[in-house]
Image (spheres, helix red, strand yellow):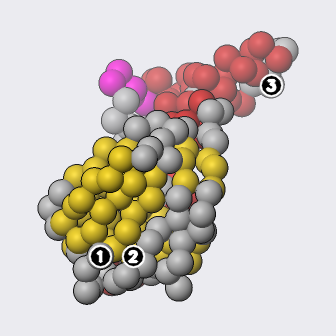
Amino acid sequence: MKSLIPGADDSTRVSMQAATAAKPLNPTDALYKEQLFFSGGEEKRRRTSRVLVDNVKIEFEKTPMGRVSYVIDPKTGFLMRVLGTLLAEISPGKRSGAHRHMYEEVNYVISGQGYSLIEDQRYDWSEGDVLCIPVFSWHQHFNTGDRPARFLVHHNRPLMENLGFMHVEQGESSDDD
């Protein structure tokens, strides 16, 4: 396999292969070798991870937060360490669950109209608007329109999980079946 790592050529690969074949001398040597080979493994992970989400295959599933589809997430095969993306949908006249979390969120309103309660403040929104949900803020969304409201949600939950700071609290559950 051709390497995109600067400076890597056949002689580099041979020395790396030789180092791999050698049994680690001690735990520190083993840890160093793991660090040494991280980039090569990362390149393989990049080349084999998912890159595209086919909109025809997107399915919304019920959660206490509401109807959600995790479209870009490390747990769905994407090599993402910092960001994730989901789609949320709220039926006409329904609401999402009230919740808060230790990660930031940016919600782009794809369709629909309604309002959100973010920490005791009401924010009216419609198609094309963007909501910024600050860290650990209670929030809940309400669809006041006559068609489904959809949000494209970008968040940094993967980063918080990787750092060990993941925390979510669920208050009121969604009433959207």
x and y, in percent, of residue 83 in the image:
41, 44
Magenta span contains residue 99:
no
User: How many other residues sit within 10 Å of disc 1, few (<14), some (14-19) or many (≥20)?
Assistant: many
Q: Is residue 152 above or below residue 175?
A: above
Q: Do the residues labelled 3 and 1 touch (CB within 8 Å)?
A: no
x and y, in percent, of residue 166 in the image:
62, 40
Q: Do the residues labelled 2 and 1 touch (CB within 8 Å)?
A: no
Query: Which segment did they paint magenta?
Result: 6-10
User: How many other residues sit within 10 Å of disc 3, few (<14), some (14-19) or many (≥20)?
Assistant: few
Q: In the drawing, what numbered circle is on residue 23?
A: 3
Q: What element carries label 2?
A: strand
Q: Mark 2 points at which residue?
A: 90
* Front position among marks 3 and 2: 2
Q: In this view, does 43 lie above or below 12?
A: below
Q: Residue at x 42, y 78 (%)?
A: 94
Lateral position of residue 84 relative to residue 25, left or right: left
Q: Main secondary structure of the magenta part?
A: loop
